[in-house]
Amino acid sequence: MKAVSYITATVLVAAVAVDGVRAADAAFEADSARMVNMLAEPQKGDRLLWMRKSPFVAERGKLDEQRALAKSLLARMPAEQEGADDARKEALRRRAIVWQIIADSPEAPARLSPTPFCGELQESALSFDRPGEYGEFVDDPLASDGRAIKMFNSHHQWCAMMMMNRIAFEPGVKYRLRARLKCAATARGNAFTAGVFDERTWKLAGQVSVRADRMSPDYAWYDICTFVPNDGEYFWIAPGKLNKNGDKDANALWLDKISFEPVPEEKLAIIPAPQKMTVTGGECRLKGEPKVEKVVSIPPEGYELSITTDGVTIRCSDDVGAFYARMTLSQIEKIDPKTKQKIYPCVEITDAPKFKWRGVNFDDARHFFGKDVILHILEQMSWYKLNVFHWHITDDQYWPLEIPGFPELQQYGGECLVAGQSRKYHGEKVSPGIYTANDVREIVAYAKARHITVVPEIEFPGHSVCALCAYPQLACDPQYILKRERDPSNFGGGGNGVLCIGNPDSIRFIEKVLDHVCEIFPSEVIHIGGDECPRTFWEKCPKCQAFVKSEGLTGIEQIQPWVTRHFTEYLAKKGRRAIGWDEIFIESKNRHVNVSNTKITSLLPKSTMGMCYRVQGAGVAAANQGYDIVMTPHMYTYFDYRQNLPEDPYMYFGGVRLPLSKVYQFDPLAGVDAAARPHIVGGQCCNWTSHTFYRYDLEWKLWPRGLALAEVLWTYPDPAKRDFAEFSKRAAVHRLRLIRAHVNCAPLK
């Protein structure tokens, strides 16, 4: 659209076809034909619909040409009428109606403000087939300017009654069209029909019909429609038909003013919100499937979605973008209850994610949930363009992943908490299930079909109680394990089990585990844990002390970085990349030291990725050193924290509160220098499931907070301008959508 686009309300004039009428003046008839060519093309049949072809959008020279030609034809009209028969005179009279409108069009300024107006409705712009029979300008003391248009009857069931001279609209802005009207107290049935018509496509951009019994006998404003102005549109209004008794005043309609008001930007209930969206007005009733076009310039995962009245077009550079475009379509889709046809609002969307890692952590070791629950969560993630399923599949409490050659992992870790069957509530120990290689492949394939990457996490060297119960010889002190009957539930909370790194069998054990993990998980990234690793066992262990000397380490504080470096390099040989919790970057005897206030180890290769979960400063410090970081600071992303709901039937960890509004405040780039920002690859939420017992408990804690996380990581709205109230309106729509899909979504507040 041009910098300024002009729209004109035009006149529809019914004219009898003039085929066969010979003109006395060939030049006159040639000029008349030229004028016709400037207007709309004639329609077939006994009548012609004459319209301005491109009303007042043409260059000033063409507009002047039209006006000059119309005046010339009118000046020569009397000579043409002399001696003409009645048919010829009638044909000329009908032509003159249109010519007079063009000739009298005022030398209006280039722009008229699209605010309520009436003065621009010139009397010369009012045209009727038979003046005085269908409408006229009248004096009306109740009208705003003491002057109004009184309409008696439509020539057709609908017709335009006036031409509005040049009005300037901002390009791409949506306007609300309103009219100040009153109707006769005796009016019956349909008082008026009005709308905006696009003469280029011969389609209505908007329309409304109002019954007389719903109108006031006094002037009042009525909403006609909303639309985005286009060249070649015009406003039309038609009163109801005459009453049967033929009284032309019985259904009279008075028009005082017309108003065009910019409509605040309309946001469809899409989550995550698209990067750019323009609602163009109208709807598409889709027949068949959307058209998909590959455009290499569109960024990965991005898409363009164009919905017009003619159909739906998806443009993307990869299959992921096409998938996400369809997810967006599903959020704005309506189904006609009668025809079952899909209906979409007309909209133009340009969209792509801000961050490539948009994750959900799934803790399957503290409570075992099983394959079916995982598939449910993966499906829900795909609806909101979340693309990383971080599967925390081993921990102190349980090791549900089957590893060939290590059957004791399930045997000695099999009496722990199970989703929906916790001994905390049932008073007995139960044996959770396991995930076989085939189970994993099924889950990975299901996720891949939804463009979700499954990133497995094998916790070590800490959080290894379950592995040590299965194989006590891998501990620094095997008796410590045996005294507790090789039962993970006898070890209390986390942090009481760490692999003996001075024992070569510990290294070989993890290598064999990772070999199998790489075989069944195709993900480029493998999570190797590294958090909350107690150094006290290493300090007292002769094997670990000897290991420090043999490897030339400065002390036990470098054991953790050595482990990370070793397995980062081990995975790199398999074409994989290691990621660990933010403690992997520190050299300290105290595992609680924060990487944000201590030096970062120099032992790790830059290919190592970090996952920042304590304070964001830890991730900022690592990113500044060139490490890729996933942000998941607990104060914004730990969904095992309370939601601050007035009524909540579920248990949570501790007393920290994380309401929906705070999740929406999460800024993965907070405090990150511009140069280091490319190293912040994304973020995720976490729910450590010691207090989450089954699927509906899990869903309650994930949604609707997951909606806020999805928008932060995909759209990344400006942190200084985030509108939580506006987001909440969209989130309310999606909560209902989730509930209808049998997802146990918590209230917004």
Image (cartoon, rainbow, N blue to C red):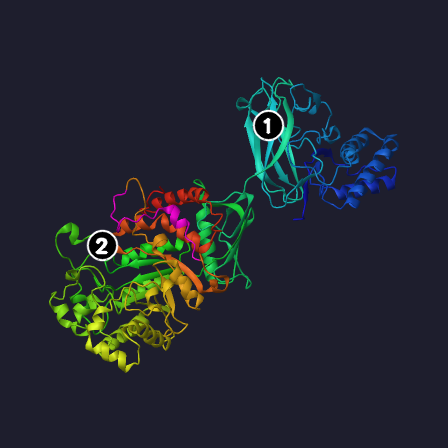
Residue 322 placement (x, y as % from top left): 48, 58
Q: Are marks 2 and 1 in contact (CB under 8 Å)?
A: no
N-terminal label among 2 and 1: 1
For this rendering, which residue is in front, 324 or 529? 529
Residue 505 placement (x, y as % from top left): 22, 78
SS state under label 1: strand
Decide if residue 351 is in sight here: yes
Q: Is residue 146 toward the left or the right of residue 450 in the image?
A: right
Residue 212 placement (x, y as % from top left): 55, 23
Report the magenta stretch's main SS.
Answer: loop
- Residue bearing mark 1: 192
Q: Is residue 741 shown above or below 599?
A: above
In the rendering, which numbered label is found on residue 419? Answer: 2
Decide if residue 452 is in sight here: no
Q: Quadrant of the C terminus?
A: top left
Badge 2 local density, few (<14 within 10 Å), some, or many (20+)?
A: many
SS state under label 2: loop
Q: Is residue 681 toward the left or the right of residue 416 in the image?
A: right
For marks 2 and 1, give the CA distance: 63 Å
Q: Residue at x 27, y 43 (%)?
A: 648
In the rendering, which numbered label is found on residue 424? Answer: none
- The amino acid beneath tag 2 is Ala
Residue 144 placement (x, y as % from top left): 65, 24
- The amino acid beneath tag 1 is Phe
Indicate yes or no whether the magenta region holds residue 660: yes
Q: Is residue 326 toward the left or the right of residue 179 in the image?
A: left
Say which quarter of the image contains residue 132: top right
Part of the protein shown in magenta: 648-668
Say which quarter of the image contains residue 188: top right
Badge 1 local density, few (<14 within 10 Å), some, or many (20+)?
A: many
Say which quarter of the image contains residue 171: top right
Q: Is residue 707 toward the left or the right of residue 485 in the image?
A: right
